[in-house]
Image (tube, rainbow, N blue to C red):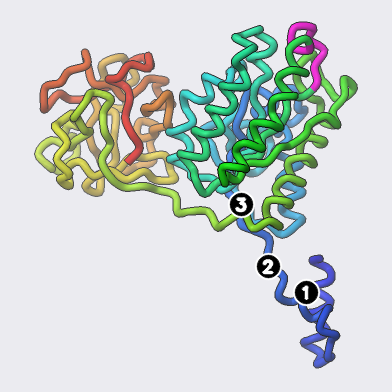
């Protein structure tokens, strides 16, 4: 189609009158702009790939050659490709991905999610009879958090693990019905059949080799092209949201002490009141901003209990906040934004602490 369009354009510029059928190619819609979140486990991350690019590298090549403007998004980075962002977590099951899905989807708002998950549920023999139910719940979670996204659900690939192979056929048989139910509810969810991969496409018992990843890329690309042709894929919504950051402690919000924008002013919990001291904005550079300043770990400290304040935005690692387990994690320290001792007292300064998933470490996206 791209070549036909180029021929049409050249002919028109030369003043050639074209048949109506050929001239109609001039009006063919441009390929959709894509903000893709590759979501899943170590297969998404790229274990077994010689470059670490997983299926993402070949998929990027295919999509770019087809004319799509493309941005991969996620909190993880792996591979030699120029845009290695992804949301692949080695060893994770469906329930663990569900634990971060709300936060990362709210931060990045992809218009396409490529979902390949379930390998670890099956290989760990983890509550296998209810694994399809967990997958259905995860898809519902994704379509709720990112209602403008098309979700491409890959079947679990072949393995040579006797445990996984005993569980895989039953799980994969359930996936088409899950997708059909989602489609019947009006959701943009599409099945991606990964049965083209064989044991010869594996680098070990669970992970594809480069050839296997190429087959996965081709399958996901076909799904994206079909979704685009069906009109499912709209332009990505703007990244960056603004509003209250609510604590898991009921009624409390992240707040700048006294609404003071001076460097070093404490970030604290306070009863939610919608004042400017509580209006935060997420940014694509990984910062949380209020009153023109960035949420900052004082002195770039990394220890448990290090205090959090606001400071001039400077690009430092102590000002980076990744959505994590329904809260925020600072990657430089490896610790999470924390309301110490689950305090309910207004004015308690927030700190960083070992991530534990407690209500005192849960913070909504703005």
Q: Position of residue 356 (x, y in %)?
A: 37, 14
SS at badge 1: helix
Residue 29: numbered disc: 2
Q: Left of 147 or right of it: where is 48? A: right
* Residue found 45% across the figure and 54% down from its top: 238
- Farthest right residue? 200
Residue 25: numbered disc: 1
Around disc 1, counting alpha carbons within 10 Å, would you say few (fewer than 14), some (14 to 19), or many (20 or more)?
A: some
Q: Nearer the viewer, mark 1 or mark 3?
A: 1
Around disc 3, counting alpha carbons within 10 Å, would you say few (fewer than 14), some (14 to 19), or many (20 or more)?
A: many
* Residue found 49% across the figure and 31% down from its top: 101
Q: Are marks 1 and 3 in contact (CB under 8 Å)?
A: no
User: From mark 1 to mark 3, how far is it between C-alphas?
Assistant: 22 Å
- Asked if the magenta segment contains residue 160, the reply would be yes
Q: Position of residue 326 (x, y in %)?
A: 39, 27
When the figure is inspected, residue 36 is found, relative to residue 116, above or below; the finding is below
SS at badge 2: loop
For the N terminus, which image quadrant?
bottom right
Q: Nearer the viewer, residue 22 or 80?
A: 22
- Point out the stretch of residues depicted in magenta: 158-165
Q: Position of residue 244 (x, y in %)?
A: 25, 40
Residue 292: numbered disc: none
- Asked if the magenta segment contains residue 247, the reply would be no
Q: Quadrant of residue 235?
A: bottom right
Q: Position of residue 276 (x, y in %)?
A: 17, 47
Q: Left of 229 or right of it: where is 260? A: left
Q: Nearer the viewer, residue 48 or 27?
A: 27
Residue 34: numbered disc: 3
């Amino acid at each position: 189609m791209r070549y036909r369009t180029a021929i049409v354009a050249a002919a028109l510029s030369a003043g050639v009158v074209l048949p109506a059928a050929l001239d109609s190619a001039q009006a063919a819609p441009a390929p959709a702009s894509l903000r893709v979140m590759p979501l899943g486990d170590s297969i998404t991350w790229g274990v077994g790939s010689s470059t670490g690019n997983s299926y993402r590298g070949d998929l990027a090549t295919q999509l770019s050659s087809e004319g799509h403007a493309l941005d991969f998004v996620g909190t993880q980075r792996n591979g030699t490709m120029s845009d290695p962002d992804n949301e692949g977590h080695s060893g994770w099951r469906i329930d663990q991905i569900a634990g971060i899905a709300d936060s990362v989807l709210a931060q990045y708002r992809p218009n396409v999610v490529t979902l390949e998950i379930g390998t670890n549920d099956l290989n760990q023999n983890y509550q296998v009879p209810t694994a399809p139910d967990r997958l259905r719940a995860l898809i519902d979670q994704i379509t709720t958090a990112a209602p403008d996204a098309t979700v491409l659900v890959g079947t679990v690939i072949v393995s040579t693990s006797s445990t996984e192979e005993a569980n895989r056929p039953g799980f994969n048989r359930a996936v088409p019905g899950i997708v059909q139910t989602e489609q019947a509810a009006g959701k943009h969810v599409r099945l991606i059949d990964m049965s083209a991969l064989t044991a010869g496409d594996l680098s070990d018992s669970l992970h594809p080799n480069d050839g296997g990843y190429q087959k996965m890329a081709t399958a996901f690309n076909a799904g994206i092209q079909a979704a685009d042709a069906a009109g499912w894929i709209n332009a990505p919504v703007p990244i960056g949201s603004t509003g209250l950051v609510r604590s898991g402690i009921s009624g409390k919000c992240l707040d700048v002490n006294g609404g003071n924008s001076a460097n070093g002013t404490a970030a604290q919990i306070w009863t939610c009141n919608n004042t400017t001291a509580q209006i935060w904005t997420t940014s694509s550079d990984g910062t949380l901003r209020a009153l023109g300043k960035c949420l900052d770990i004082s002195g770039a400290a990394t220890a448990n209990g290090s205090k959090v304040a606001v400071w001039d935005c400077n690009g430092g690692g102590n000002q980076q906040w990744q959505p994590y387990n329904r809260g925020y994690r600072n990657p430089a320290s490896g610790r999470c934004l924390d309301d110490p001792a689950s305090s309910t007292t207004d004015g308690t300064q927030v700190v960083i602490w070992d991530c534990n998933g407690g209500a005192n470490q849960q913070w909504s996206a703005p």
